[in-house]
Image (cartoon, rainbow, N blue to C red):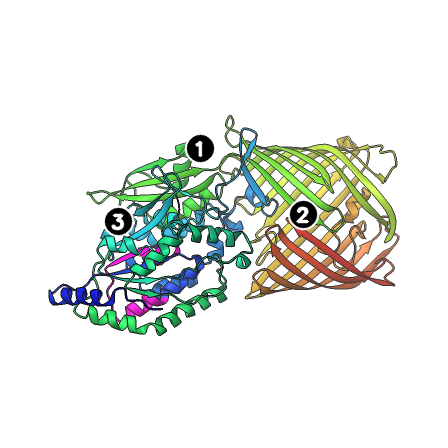
Amino acid sequence: MFFCKKKWICLFFLFTLIHAGNSPKIGLVLSGGGSKGFAHIATLKALDSLNIPIDYIAGTSFGAIVGAMYALGYTGKQIEEMALATDWYEVQNDEPERKFLPYFRKKDTGKYQLDFGLKGVKPVAPTGLIYGQKIILELSKWTRNYEQVYDFDKFPIPFRCNAFDIISGKEVIIKEGSLANALRASISIPTIFAPVEWGDALLVDGGVVNNLPVDIAKEMGADIILAIDVSSPAQTKVNINNMYDIIFQSISVHGNDKWEKSKEAADYLIHPEINNVSLLDYRQSTINYLFQAGEDAVESNWDIFLQLQKLIKDSKKSAAKINPLENPKIRQVTINGNKELPKHFILDYMGIEKGSQLDVEKLDANISQLYSLGYFKTLYYEIHPQLDGRVDILIQVNEGSLRKFQLGIRWDNYYDLVGVANVQLNSNWIPGLRIENQTQFAGIQKNEFSVYYPSRKLNFPLYPFLRITNSKYNYQYYNKGNYGGRYTLLSDGFTTGIGLLLKNYWNTELNYFWKMESFLPENVSQNKEIIAGINLSAQLDLLDDILLPKNGIVVRGKYENSSTEWGSAVNYHMYQGSGDIFFTRKRNTFRIAGYYHQGLNDLPKNLTTISNGSQTFVGLKEFQLQGKTLLFSRFEYRYKHKKDIFAHLILSWLITAKSDDSHISTENILCPGVGITLLSPLGPLEFIWSRGPENFYINESWKNVFHFSAGYKF
C-alpha cells in the first residue's frame, strides 16, 4: 500500500530542497506488532540494495529492536541472520536453561505452575508473566560493544524509541541511556512483560499510545517519512479468542486514533499483508512467512524505493561508525537496587573490580550464573564511559523475594487430581540456610518439612539436612501378579544426614532414617512398626528438561539397609538403580531407559512395587509391576509433529522378575504402546494406549491398558 500525502505540496517542497542544494532527510518509521516485526527486515535489505541512506529512525516495540540494530550499523542481511539465530521462545522464558541451574534449583524444575513471592505471609503476584531477564541479556549481546554510547543521536543513524509511562499516563520518547534497557522498555506488552523502571517512570510497550511514531521521526528532523506498518487493525468480536487477543485489542483501541493520524502523516506507507499471526508466534515457519510477507510488500511497492533513490541521488550513506569497546579499564563498580542481598555477595559473582579490564562476555556469563540462583527478577549492567578512557559499571538489580510460595497441580491416572503447595524460606539470620515445607493434597496426602544448608551460593560441597515426613498413600496390592485388593500406606518419620555436591549435576546423600510405618488392607487397624536404618543415594542429572527431555542423561542409585541394630523392627537390604538417556535429531527424540532393584530379607511390600504404571512400563497398570527382583528397560521414539504436539512409539521389555517369596519368576516379556503428548499451560497432557499381560508372572491372556496424565511432576 502506498500513500503520498498532499502530493503537489510535497513535490514542491522536495523540488525546493533539491535545488537549494540540500538533499531531503529521510526518516524510517517501524511499527510495533510483536513477531510480525520480522516483516520489517525486507525493507532494510531493499534500502541496502539500492544504497538509500536513512537519516533518522524511530521505532516502537519490535520495530524498535529492528530499527536500533540498523541504527547501530548492522545491515538488513545481518539483522535477518541474527533473527534466525535466536531462539525467540527461549529468550522469553525467564527460567535459565536447566543445565545451568544449581542442583537445588534443578531438582525443583517441572513441579510448580505458579510461583509467588511472599510479603509477610501474603503471596504477591508478579507484575507480568515475563520479567524479561533473558531478553535484556540477548539485547545486551547485540548492543554490548556500543553500550558506551548513551546519546542515541551519536549512533551512525540517530535513533528514537518510545514507551508508555503507566504512572504519568504519558508517552516517553527515549533518546539516551542504556540501549538494551530502552528496547526492553519499548517491547513491554502489558501483562505479558513486567514494566521497566526508568527513573521515576514505569514503562510499558510504546504501542499502547503510539504504535507508528511518525511524529517522532519528524521531530528529529526528517523531511520524508517512510513508514512500515506491520500492525493489524482492531479486531471484531468473533476474532477475539484468547487473552493475547484481548491484550492486543486493548492496545489497539487505546492508540487507534493516533495510529490513523500517523498513517496519514507518512509520505510513504508500506503495509505488508499478514494474516493469522499472533503477537507471540515465533515458530520457524511463521518467521519464514513473515520474511516473505515483507519481501512481497517491498516488491509490490518497489516504485517507492526507486523514487527515494532519485530524490537522494547525490547523497551517500553515512560512513560514521562506533568504535566497539575493547577491554577498557574499570574506574568503579556500583550496585543499584539491592535490598536484602549484600553488595559483596553480588560483586563476588561479577568477577569485576576497580582497575581491572572489562570483559563483557565474561560479565554476561557471570550475570547469567548469578541470576540462576533464583534471587532476582532482573539483573543487568550499564557501561558509562569516562573522559580518561576508563568506564564505570553500574549493576542494576531487581531482587525477587527470598521467601516463596509455589503451587502445582497434576492429574494422575490412579490418584486423579493431586495438588502441591510449597513454602520456601531463605534465612536472613543464617545466610544460606533454607527451610521448606511441601504439602501434597487431594488424591495424595503428604507433608515434608525440610531444613538444609546449601549456602547462599547453592554450591557448598557438603550440606547437612533434616527432613520430617508424614504421608498417606492408597495402594493396589498385587501378590505374584494377582490383584490382592486396596491397601493403605501410612508413614511418619524423619531423615537426617549429610549431602555431597559435585558442581550442579552430581549429588550424593548419606542419611539415617527412622519412621513408623504400616502397609495393610483398607479398613484394617493400622498398627505401625518402626523401620530405621541408613540410606546411601547418588544421582547424576544432565537432562535439559524434566517434563519433555530432548537431550541428556540421568542416573540414580540407592542402597538402603534397615536393621535391628539401628532400632528397626525389620531387617532388609535393598539395591536400586535406574538410568535414562535422551538424544534428539531434528524432530526425532530417542529414549533408552533401564531399571533394576533387588531386595533381601524382610523387604516391605510397598518397596517392591512400581506404582507409575504405563508411565514407567507400558502394558501394565499402576502397582501391577511388583517383585523382590525386577530388571526391565524401555525404548521410546518421540516425533515432534508441531511445537506442542508429539507422537510416541514405546516398547517395554521385562527382562526378569521374581516374586516377593522368590518362588515364581518370569522373563523376556515385550509390551508395546503408542501415545500422544500435548503441551498446555498446565503442563504436558499424555495419552498412552498399550498391551500387556493380565498377570506377567503367568503371561497368558493380554489386555488393553489406557493411561492419561496431565500437569507437572512432583
Q: Which of marks 1 and 2 is nearer the N terminus?
A: 1
Q: Is mark 2 on a helix, strand or loop?
A: strand
| Residue that sits furthest to the left in the current view | 20
Task: Name the residue that disc number 1 marks.
Answer: 341
Give the residues in magenta: 42-68
Q: Distance between the residues labelled 2 and 3?
A: 50 Å
Neighbour tally class for label 3: few under 14, some 14-19, many 20 plus, Cα within 10 Å:
many
Which mark is on residue 149? Answer: 3
Position of the C terminus by quadrant: top right
Q: Left or right of 92: which side holds 364?
A: left
Q: Which of 678 and 562 is in front in this view?
A: 678
Amino acid residing under circle 2:
Arg
Task: Name the residue that disc number 2 marks.
Answer: 410
Q: Earlier in the sequence, mark 1 or mark 3?
A: 3
Q: Position of residue 237 (x, y in %)?
A: 53, 56
- Residue 403 among magenta residues: no
Residue at image coords 56%, 61%? 643
Amino acid residing under circle 1:
Leu
Q: Where is residue 401 in the image (x, y as percent from the top left)?
A: 50, 35
